[in-house]
Image (cartoon, rainbow, N blue to C red):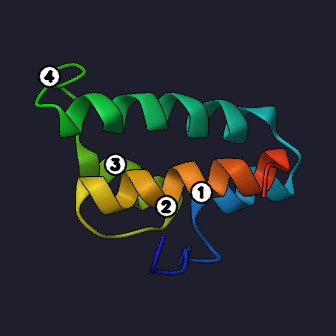
Amino acid sequence: MDKPIEIKGDCKFMQDLEANNKFAIYNLIVSIRDVKLWTKGMKINRHWKISHVKKYFGMNGSPKILLEKMETLHKIIMGDL
């Protein structure tokens, strides 16, 4: 990936992660799945919005860039990088 991952330090994901809340990892995994479906033209449910994902993770960009950032973040957290 060319661009670095930029995350706002006060986002809900970072707060959950720092509190050793396993819910943060779960949200990351499920959100990766949801954004993959969104990039293929499928909406998860009628209340789901990409802006909610961006706000929770403190990231911005198009859905494809957001997906790349989230997948890289997952690899970093799980120790694959």
Q: Kindly report the distance in space between the C-alpha atoms of the residues bearing marks 3 and 2.
A: 16 Å
Element at label 3: helix
Element at label 4: loop
Asked if 3 appears above or below 37 in the picture, the reply is below
Left or right position of 9 against 50: right
Say if mark 2 contacts mark 1, CB within 8 Å: yes
Which residue corresponds to mark 4? Answer: 46
Precedes in sequence: disc 3 or disc 1: 3
The tally of labels here is: 4
Q: Residue at x 29, y 69 (%)?
A: 61
Which residue corresponds to mark 1? Answer: 72
Q: Nearer the viewer, mark 3 or mark 2?
A: 2
Q: Kindly report the distance in space between the C-alpha atoms of the residues bearing marks 3 and 1.
A: 19 Å
Horizontal and vertical percent position of residue 3: 46, 80
Precedes in sequence: disc 3 or disc 2: 3
Q: Kindly report the distance in space between the C-alpha atoms of the residues bearing marks 3 and 4.
A: 13 Å
Which residue corresponds to mark 3? Answer: 52
Q: Residues within 10 Å of mark 1 (few under 14, many from 20)?
A: some
Q: Residues within 10 Å of mark 3 (few under 14, many from 20)?
A: few
Question: Which residue type carries mark 1?
Answer: Thr
Say if mark 3 contacts mark 4, CB within 8 Å: no
Say if mark 3 contacts mark 2, CB within 8 Å: no
Question: Which residue type carries mark 2?
Answer: Lys
Quadrant of the rendering where the C terminus is positioned: bottom right
Precedes in sequence: disc 3 or disc 4: 4
